[in-house]
Amino acid sequence: MVGLSSKSYELLSKIATNEKHGENSPYFDGWKAYDRDPYHPTRNPQGVIQMGLAENQLCFDLIEEWLKKNPKASICTPEGLHQFRDIANFQDYHGLPQFTSAVAKFMSKVRGGRVKFDPNRILMSGGATGANELIMFCLADPGDAFLVPTPYYAAYPRDLCWRTGLRLIPVHCDSSNNFKITREALESSYKKAKDDNINVKGLIITNPSNPLGTSLDRDTLKSLVNFTNDNNIHLVCDEIYSATVFDSPRFVSVAEIIEEMDDSSCKKELIHIVYSLSKDMGFPGFRVGIVYSYNDIVVNCGRKMSSFGLVSSQTQHMLAAMLSDDEFVDNFLKESSRRLAKRHEYFSKGLEEVNIKRFPSNAGLFYWMNLSSLLKEQSFEAEMALWRVIINEVKLNVSPGSSFNCLEPGWFRVCFANMDDETVEVALNRIRAFVIGKEKTTKNNNRAKKNNNVVEVKKRWQQNLRLSFSSSRLLDHHETVMSPHILSPHSPIPASSPLVQAT
Amino acid sequence: MRLLSRKATCNTHGQDSSYFLGWEEYEKNPYDKVKNPNGIIQMGLAENQLSFDLLESWLAKNPDVSGFKRDGKSIFRELALFQDYHGLPLFKKALVDFMAEIRGNKVTFDPNHMVLTAGATSANETLMFCVAEEGDAFLLPTPYYPGFDRDLKWRTGVEIVPIQCTSSNNFRITESALEQAYQDARKRNLRVKGVLVTNPSNPLGTTLSRNEFDLLVDFIKDKETMHLISDEIYSGTVFSSPSFVSVMEILKEMTPNDAAKIWNRVHVVYSLSKDLGLPGFRVGAIYSENDAVVAAATKMSSFGLVSSQTQYLLAAMLSDNKFTKKYISENQKRLRRRQRMLVTGLQKAGIKCLKSNAGLFCWVDMRHLLCSNTFEAEMELWKKIVYQVGLNISPGSSCHCSEPGWFRVCFANMSQDTLNVAMKRVKNFVTDSTGAECGSSSACFTKSFSNWVFRLSSRDHRAPEER
């Protein structure tokens, strides 16, 4: 850790002083620029727009309306106060029965009612962050490994490895076949690990995928179940984005695959699901993480471990009421999907206008963009250089593909569900202008010829934005590059937020 | 190849211990004044249920908070999105002020040195991850909270080596006991990373004396990689003298030279589960002047943050200084009254308690009721108390007490009526059992007991979290 005295290294543990929390990776560096200079439509229109945060802000109005109509869901309102003491006192790690039932029902609805979940298999944890760490503590010992297809969520090294002592073995997926997870890729990584005497305990996938924004097709999912079953290793499916599927193909959960296969052909006890309400409902602040395991020993042990990150009973109580309201949930899921689809489409069109290649997606809160045509060379250094320009000059905080362990340079994840329509427009304007500006400075005639309409677009937008891009600036930026720091990677409170005002 | 991890299949979590076994019996047959007047009364649960009315009346007077509103404007969205592991600034400020108030404002705390965690359970585990390696050891005075086996050891791989305290001096920490523990650790080839004390003590209900503080400080002062962790979760439950002295006060009083040696190795753990009676809300905290510890613990808190809606609610409540002042004093008054009731009730049955000035329980001396001075006899007596007397209390062995015959009995998690019923039952039991035969049925007892333990430990207990 930068800035630690040598004394700290003696005084603290290795875990506390190593870098395995990963917070010095560039994924988090972009925050600093945003923190220093956050965009605001009136107060700071030239500020950095946050597009590195996979949040779902599209449906709060629906929830606020429900809360207004359901004061009993709060233990602090006159209508709900009589429940205060029982709820405040409740710390049973089985969770409030009405909460686990409601979550089980919600998870089932998200999967179109095609599967049922047993509330007794639901374990709570401190967000999906806590859930992922918890399941690893249950399944593997320090030094063991988990396979994970690339590209993958930037914080997996922290969540899966930091305190558990595990290691991640990437499974190579690339754009040549749309980042498909092939049996060959799995076998290859698995074999290599075994040859290196690494004890592989399982495979972890995120479905729908972060950062790809796609849900796995049934055949691929089945092949993953077969692969892990055949090798007697675990399969952990992080389905945190399951309700963000807004387009076909419809979401297929591993739970469905299990139901289809009979007991003799599927070793259920090797399969575990991680879930959370942070993305589907937009509640990252409420820290609702779930581990659902088909393995009785894991449920038993995991339940004890959940003591380290139980969901606040106040929150359990509120969500139990909300998620048991069938009418509300049905409407919410439908409307959320619709709004995500709309936002996705609008953003798509914007990117299309400037020929930005993007990965066709049907889920998630982000786009996987390909900007390799804008790289000086096809290298990760060039990707980082481009990224710094995007942050410092285009004033967008996006996430470089390398932070997701993508094997090819030039990919970027850009989030679109954490802002209002106007901000989307501003962001798109900036992207358009940047792309056009960049293309203007390249000596590639082919590109210039290809996009006649780009020149048209440029005329329209250029006057609105100050944009400069030259290779000399690149060097300046490299020197002023954000140094690793200890800042929160989570959404900081803007100074204007009512949360920071004094009482 | 082993299918699950070692942690998943060992029992270091300690939840097969007798401490938790009593729950099963209680759950099967819980006392209810009307519906089940012969049921088992829960006295093994260190909860504070005496002052909810004060919290409820504050809530009734502050409707804005409940409606996720600030000055009439909805802040639901901001709260729902807020996951910054630095915590809600308003809440941390309110919490440090509350902690200072509990300490008579003799010390102040800097919110930037505080890390929020999901309960003290998480705080203690996180601190271990920060200051010790797998295989290192922490010294803990006995008897200690049974949950420490899970919180400090389970996933961290850290060992606990007991500092054996005895009734000969009211279980105070002595220099020789400290030294002995240190040597025991060395003999086991364990590197000692520090001492962890609970002050006020669970299960003793006493506050650390200045003499004990001196011993602890002297012990770690010149051992440069050793930490002192003070779990002050019961600090607000001190209801009579001597008044509470926090380790932070001790630090403040030290000479600059001495303080310089240890200020960055002293850490405090806190929670609102006992003082405010809110264990369900999962509000824990680590406080340290060591920036590196704060930085590392803050990152780790990602695994167990406090729900933003809970932070918000408590920020509002604890910022109300009029309220907190009244609450702290009234709560202590009620605890004192209740403790007196228990002590007097037990006295009437010829049972003495360790003199205590804090906590939600008494440390009760039932050595004279043992058939023999053994832990087997303690277990026999405990079984009698659970089954015949109908009280779930905690046997000292589950708290790693070095002497048999001591029990922790809680008094703040039930109504006054129920406590009276419990006291009557104790009196009857003692009266009836005076002159009763010891030992003749002990063989039977032992066999059926071990069958019972075997049966229970192989099932998943509905064991609530508790201390």
Image (cartoon, coloured by chain):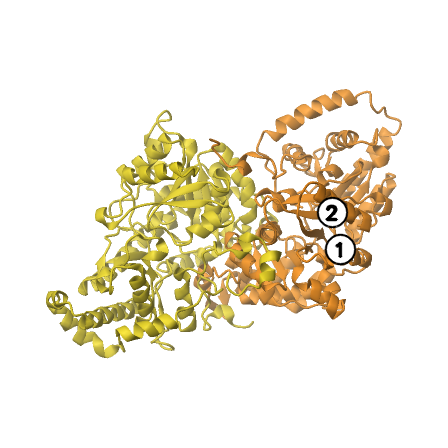
Return the disc, 2 or 1, that comes first in the chain's sequence. Answer: 2
Residue drawn at x 35%, y 26% as measured from the top left: A265
Q: Does residue B60 show up?
A: no
Asked if disc 2 and disc 1 are in contact, CB closer than 8 Å, the reply is: yes
In the displayed structure image, the side of residue A261 where residue B319 appears, left or right: right
Chain name for mark 2: B
Label 2: state its secondary structure: helix
Three-letter residue code for mark 2: Tyr
In this rendered view, identify the residue nearer to me: A272 or B296.
Answer: B296
Q: Does residue B67 show up?
A: yes
In the displayed structure image, the side of residue B93 where residue A369 appears, left or right: left
Among the 4 quarters of the image, the one containing residue A38: bottom left
Chain name for mark 1: B
Residue at the disc numbered 2? B182
Q: Position of residue B63 (x, y in %)?
A: 55, 63
Residue drawn at x 79%, y 58% as measured from the top left: B214
**Labels 2 and 1 within one chain:** yes
Residue at the disc numbered 1? B219
Residue B104 numbered mark, or none: none
Three-letter residue code for mark 1: Phe
* Above or below, B375 relative to B329: above
Residue drawn at x 82%, y 32% as measured from the top left: B429
Q: Position of residue B44 (x, y in %)?
A: 70, 41
Q: Position of residue B423 (x, y in %)?
A: 80, 40
Task: Say few, some or many: other residues with alpha carbon within 10 Å of mark 2 (under 14 / 14 to 19 / 20 or more).
Answer: many
Cα distance between the residues tagged 2 and 1: 10 Å
Q: How many dots with numbers?
A: 2
Q: Position of residue B359 (x, y in %)?
A: 74, 51
Instruction: Output the letter for the chain in yellow.
Output: A
